[in-house]
Image: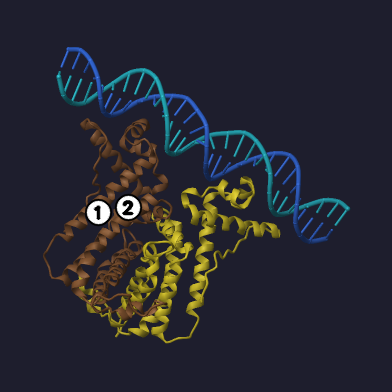
Chain colours: A yellow, B brown, C blue, D cyan
DNA sequence: TCCTATTTTGGTCAAGTGTCCTAAATTTGG
DNA sequence: CCAAATTTAGGACACTTGACCAAAATAGGA
C-alpha cells in the first residue's frame, strides 16, 4: 500500500539543525490547525502557541503569513506528487487491474482526515488566489497522468484530446466523493460499495466510450477536428 | 430551462416595507462579497459599505454575524431546493431522457459563478460548522431525490440501499466537475464533451450495474443482507 | 397632523490580527 | 573555549474585527 507523507518540504530556512527542525515544526503545526480548525483559525500566534514558541520566532522563519502558507502548500503538494510518481513507476499488474487499483487507492485516500479537510480548503482558496490555483492545477495534472497513461491502452481509438477529457472525468468523479464519503462524512460507511460502483462504472466508461458519445452535446462540431486513427 | 433564483428568503425581519427590502439587500450584498472575494473578506463593515449603509444598521437586522450567515445559507439552500422540486414535478420525457437531462442541467449550473464559488465554500465550512453541515446535507438529499426516483425505473433489480448509493455516486460524480470545469476553470471549454461522457457513462452505470459489481470490494459480505427481489 | 414604532446613525469597546524591531540567549565551527 | 552566526524572546505598532449602545431620523397608521 502507498502511504502519503504529511509534508515533503525542501526547506531552505535554517542553517543550524535547530532551525531546520523548527521550520518543519511550524509547517506541521500550521497543517494541523488548518485540518482541525480551518483556514479561519490559522493565525501566526496560534501556530506559535501550537509549537510552544514565540510569535516573533515564527516570523523569523516565515516573515509573512503569505510566505508561510505558500511554503505549506508547496510541501503538501509535493508529498502528493511523490506518491503519484511512485504509483506510476510501479509496473506490476495488467492495465485494467492497474486502473481499478488506482481508483481504489484514491478513494481510500479520500477517507483520510487530511485529504477530506484539506482539499475543499484548496478548492476554495483557488477561487481567489492565483498562486494556490496554479499549484493545485499542477497537482491534478500530475494526478491525472496515470489515467492518461492507462486509457490509451484500454481504448486506443480516442484522440489525445478526447483521452485527456475522459481522464479528467474519471479524476473529477473520484474527487467528487470527498464531500460525501470522506472522513466522518455521512456515506463513509458505504465507501466499499462506492469503490465497487466507481471501479465498474469508470472502467466500463474508458473502455467503451466513443467519439460519438463524447461529441453528442458539442454544439458546433460533430467530431474532433483531427483524428489520429 | 430552469433558472435558479439567487436567494429565496422567508425573512421575518422588518415590519415596515423599508425594513423588508433592507434585510434582503443585506443578504444579497453578503452573497456578492462571498462569491467575489471569499468568506475571508465577508465582514459586517464590508457588507454595510456594499449596501451604502452604516455598520450599526446591519447589526440592527442581523445582531451577530453568525445569524447573518445562517440566514444567508438558508436562503441560498431554499433557492436550490425550489428548483429541484420544480424539475421533479415536471413529467415530460422518458426516464432515460429525464436522467440525461438532469445530468446536463446540473453540469450547466456548475458553470455559473454562483455555484462554482459558493459550493466549495459550503464544503469547507461544513467541515467545522455542524449547522452548515446539516443544511448542506439536506440540500443534497433533495438534489439526489430525482435520481432515486429514476433509478428504480432504469434498474429495478437494485435494493433500496444499493439504489441510494448509486444515486450518491452519480450526484457526487457531477459535483466533482465543479473544481475543474466550473466558472472560469481550466476545463470549462470542454464542458460539452464532459456532458457527453457523463451522460453516457452514468446512464450506462445505473442501467447495467449489479449487486455483484457493487459488493465486489465489500469486505465482510458478498451481498446485501436483504434483497427485495 | 401627530404619535408611536421602526429604522438609521455614529461612536465606543475589547479582542485579535500581521508586521516589525531590538536585545538576549543559544548554537556551531574554528 | 571563543567569537560569530543563528535562534529566540518580548514588546510595540497600526489596523481590522464583531458587538454594543444611546440618540437622532424616518415611516406609517390613527
Task: Identify the subunit bearing mark 2.
Answer: B
Check the image and report above or below for A187 versus B48: below
Write down the quadrant of residue B86 in the picture: bottom left
Q: How many marks?
A: 2
Check the image and report above or below for B96 versus B139: below
Residue at the outermost front position:
B226
Q: Does residue B94 appear in the picture of this structure? A: yes
Identify the residue at image location x=49%, y=48%. Answer: A41
Q: Does residue A218 appear in the picture of this structure? A: no
Check the image and report above or below for B224 versus C4: below
Rendering coords of residue A143 (x, y %): 43, 71
Cα separation between marks 1 and 2: 12 Å
The residue that label 2 is drawn on is B135
Write down the quadrant of residue B26 in the picture: top left
User: Closer to the camera, B215 or A54?
Assistant: B215
Label 1 residue SS: helix
Rendering coords of residue A78 (x, y %): 52, 66
User: Closer to the camera, B26 or B190?
Assistant: B26
Relative side of D7 to B62, left or right: right
The residue that label 1 is drawn on is B80
Q: Where's the C terminus of chain B, which quadrant?
A: bottom left
Identify the residue at image location x=50%, y=75%. Answer: A85
Task: Identify the subunit bearing mark 1.
Answer: B
Label 2 residue SS: helix
User: Closer to the camera, B2 or B223?
Assistant: B223
Amino acid at each position: 500500500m502507498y502511504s502519503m507523507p504529511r509534508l515533503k518540504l525542501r526547506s531552505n530556512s535554517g542553517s543550524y539543525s535547530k532551525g531546520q527542525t523548527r521550520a518543519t515544526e511550524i509547517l506541521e503545526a500550521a497543517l494541523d490547525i488548518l485540518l482541525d480548525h480551518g483556514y479561519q483559525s490559522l493565525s501566526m500566534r496560534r501556530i506559535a502557541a501550537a509549537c510552544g514558541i514565540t510569535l516573533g520566532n515564527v516570523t523569523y522563519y516565515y516573515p509573512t503569513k503569505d510566505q508561510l502558507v505558500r511554503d505549506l502548500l508547496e510541501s503538501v503538494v509535493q508529498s502528493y506528487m511523490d506518491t503519484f510518481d511512485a504509483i506510476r513507476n510501479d509496473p506490476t499488474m495488467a492495465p485494467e487491474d492497474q486502473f481499478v487499483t488506482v481508483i481504489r487507492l484514491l478513494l481510500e485516500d479520500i477517507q483520510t482526515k487530511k485529504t477530506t479537510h484539506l482539499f475543499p480548503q484548496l478548492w476554495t482558496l483557488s477561487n481567489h488566489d492565483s498562486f494556490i490555483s496554479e499549484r493545485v492545477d499542477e497537482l491534478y495534472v500530475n494526478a491525472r497522468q496515470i489515467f492518461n497513461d492507462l486509457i490509451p491502452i484500454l481504448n486506443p481509438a480516442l484522440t489525445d484530446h478526447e483521452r485527456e477529457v475522459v481522464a479528467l472525468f474519471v479524476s473529477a468523479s473520484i474527487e467528487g466523493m470527498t464531500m460525501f464519503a470522506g472522513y466522518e462524512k455521512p456515506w463513509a460507511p458505504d465507501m466499499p460499495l462506492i469503490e465497487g460502483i466507481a471501479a465498474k462504472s469508470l472502467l466500463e466508461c474508458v473502455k467503451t466510450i466513443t467519439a460519438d458519445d463524447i461529441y453528442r452535446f458539442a454544439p458546433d462540431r460533430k467530431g474532433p477536428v483531427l483524428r489520429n486513427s
